[in-house]
Image (cartoon, rainbow, N blue to C red):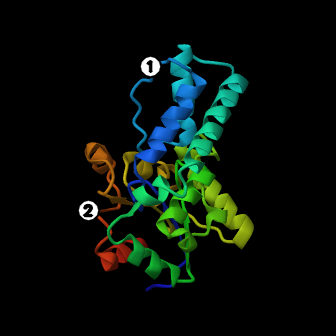
């Protein structure tokens, strides 16, 4: 394995893990608690931040834009209720429903042995949710979450790569740019969110099949059906 320093930013849902229905059910239950009796519109969760989803639903419920302070307060209430609902299932459904996707465990083991690879997450999940998912799957120890970027950092996913760069610079004195930043994910949003920074993108087909065409249309630097061919994925990560 090469020795050039790289920052690896893994998406979680559909890329590393399938986490089951408990998460979506808890989220929608929190929204229903905020807006009793409201018939929720369909929302595609894929690639979106938890905060973006909440803001979108709140705006839809009110039929248009709200003052930012009111919007954020409602968003905070929904996300707090969401986490509370999930917490009630942490010893049950959260652990029972999680699945580590093919090749992920071996890939993380390989990456964790390379001191020049800074391994973390870039996820739409709020941080607490991300931690619970990774812990339930038994893979949290493979990530330095102190330098990760989460859906609570900003509601726009394209703002998240810069947050990770700021954190790795502050905590480790490391600066990354261009193709030395590698985003791995399963949606078009993962492919596009770091484009303004010139990052490398590695797409994987283990997420929602309905989003595959849009993801591939964004022309990631590499695509894998899953991460089973660990050596090929590592070559894609390390290539200049």
Q: Which of the numbered marks, if any, corresponds to residue 39?
A: 1
Q: Sequence-wise, which precedes: disc 1 or disc 2?
A: 1
Q: In this view, does 222 lie above or below 50?
A: below
Location of mark 2 (residue):
225
Q: Is mark 1 on a helix, strand or loop?
A: loop
What residue do we see at 47% from left, 51% from top? 195
Q: Can residue 198 be seen in this view?
A: no
Please, what secondary structure does the residue beneath circle 2 have? Answer: loop
Q: Quadrant of residue 130?
A: bottom right
Dot 2: within a 10 Å radius of its alpha carbon, few (fewer than 14), some, or many (20 or more) residues? few
- Pick out the residue farthest to the top: 63
16, above or below 113, in the image: above
Q: Residue 230 carries which label?
A: none
Please give left or right for residue 109 compared with residue 208 in the image.
right
| Whole-percent x, y for residue 201 in the image | 41, 59
The quadrant where residue 167 appears: bottom right
Residue 13 in the image: x percent, y percent?
Answer: 43, 54
Whether residue 137 is situated above or below residue 55 in the rendered picture: below
Q: Identify the residue at horizontal 56%, vertical 80% (top origin).
A: 116
Residue 111 at what x, y percent from top left?
47, 78
Instruction: Measuring from the top left, give residue 182's x and y in whole percent.
Output: 47, 64
Q: Nearer the viewer, residue 240 or 42?
A: 42
The answer to whether residue 99 is above or below residue 61 is below
Q: How far apart are marks 1 and 2 (CA)?
A: 36 Å
Callout 1 environment at 10 Å: few (<14), some (14 to 19), or many (20+)? Answer: few
Q: In this view, does 77 lie to the left or right of 47?
A: right
Q: In this image, 61 relative to 211: left or right? A: right
């Amino acid at each position: 394995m090469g020795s050039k320093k790289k920052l690896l930013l893994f998406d979680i849902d559909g890329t590393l893990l399938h986490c089951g229905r408990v998460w979506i059910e808890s989220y929608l239950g929190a929204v229903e608690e905020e807006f009793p009796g409201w018939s929720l519109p369909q929302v595609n969760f894929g690639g979106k931040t938890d905060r973006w989803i909440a803001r979108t639903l709140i705006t839809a419920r009110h039929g248009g834009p709200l003052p930012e302070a009111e919007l954020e307060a409602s968003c905070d209430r929904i996300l707090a209720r969401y986490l509370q609902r999930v917490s009630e299932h942490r010893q049950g459904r959260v652990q029972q429903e999680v699945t580590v996707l093919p090749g992920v465990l071996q890939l993380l083991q390989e990456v964790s042995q390379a001191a020049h690879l800074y391994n973390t997450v870039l996820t739409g999940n709020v941080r607490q949710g991300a931690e619970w998912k990774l812990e339930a799957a038994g893979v949290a120890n493979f990530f330095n979450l102190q330098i990760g970027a989460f859906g609570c950092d900003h509601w726009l996913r394209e703002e998240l790569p810069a947050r990770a760069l700021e954190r790795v610079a502050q905590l480790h004195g490391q600066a990354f740019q261009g193709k030395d930043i590698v985003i791995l994910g399963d949606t078009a949003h993962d492919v596009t969110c770091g484009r303004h920074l010139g990052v490398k993108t590695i797409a994987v087909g283990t997420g929602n099949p309905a989003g595959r065409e849009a993801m591939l249309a964004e022309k990631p630097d590499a695509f894998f059906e899953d991460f089973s061919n660990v050596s090929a994925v590592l070559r894609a990560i390390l290539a200049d």
